[in-house]
Image (spheres, rainbow, N blue to C red):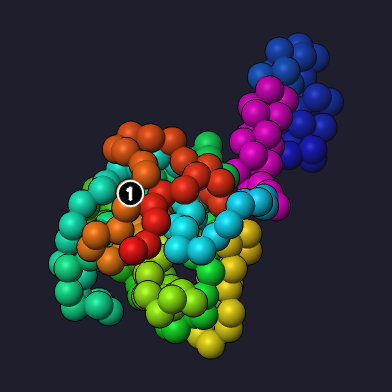
Amino acid sequence: MLLVNTVVYYSFSCKIPFYIIALVSITGYLLLGNFFRCPIRLFGHDTEKIVIAPADGKVVAIEEVDEYEYFHDRRLLVSIFMSPLNVHANWYPVDGVVKRVTHQSGKFMKAWLPKASTENERSMIVIETPEGVEVMARQIAGAMARRIVTYAEAGEECFIDEHMGFIKFGSRVDVYLPVGTEVFVRLGQATTGNQTVIGKLN
């Protein structure tokens, strides 16, 4: 960016093109800087049976669904959509032990579409809580996202407050909970990763 702006500055006697390109460059730099933030956040409360929002964004689904990839039964799905303006770092939604981590290639449909959960490129992280309850978090690439980074590894302990991964550009994180989990969020609600409580396990 600096090189382009320097060339434009010295190439035109009229400085209007330079000011336009400089403005675009600065705006782009600020947007990228905002997007790639990876803040350290502490929940600061008791985490027993608590499920925390794994991402900044907006709740786009709260519904019971049939989950066929791992559980093969009925689950409560809470989906959080991240726009390009949100922080795209992801946090573990529960304390526990990582049971399974998989990555699957797929399409790059718009992340808020229902089919994105099963047809888009995605990573699956299954966590067993200290109470023996299994919770799945699924990182889903969106229309702009082309890379999912997952830090979780099977067999390791994980805790709320720790980063689970990162998704580049607009995307979504699904959390699959046991049916009967008490839900504390509503459709359209904004969430803050590692801060908003989305539910409590029975």
Residue 146 visible somewhere in the drawing = no
On the image, the x and y values in percent for residue 62 come to: 26, 48
Q: Secondary structure at mark 1?
A: strand
Report the quarter where the N terminus lies: top right
On the image, the x and y values in percent for residue 157 come to: 58, 79
Between residue 104 and residue 81, name the one nearer to us: 81
Residue 133 visible somewhere in the drawing = yes
Q: Residue at x 58, y 57 (%)?
A: 46
Which SS type dominates the magenta stretch? helix
Report the quarter where the C terminus lies: bottom left
Between residue 19 and residue 121, name the one nearer to us: 121
Local packing at callout 1 (Cα closer than 10 Å; few below 14, some 14-19, many 20+) is: some
Q: Residue at x 38, y 35 (%)?
A: 189
Rendering quarter of residue 187 = top left
The vertical placement of 89 against 191, above or below, is below
Q: Amino acid at mark 1?
A: Val
The answer to whether residue 35 is left or right of residue 139 is: right
Q: Return the residue at label 1.
A: 183
On the image, the x and y values in percent for residue 17 come to: 68, 18
Verify whether residue 184 appears in magenta: no
The answer to whether residue 194 is left or right of residue 179 is: right
Q: Residue furthest bottom?
A: 155
Between residue 40 and residue 165, name the one nearer to us: 40
Q: Residue at x 43, y 83 (%)?
A: 100
Q: Residue at x 17, y 61 (%)?
A: 65
User: What is the span of residues highlighted in magenta in the rendered image?
Assistant: 21-40
Verify whether residue 29 appears in magenta: yes
The answer to whether residue 129 is left or right of residue 59 is: right
On the image, the x and y values in percent for residue 110 come to: 30, 48
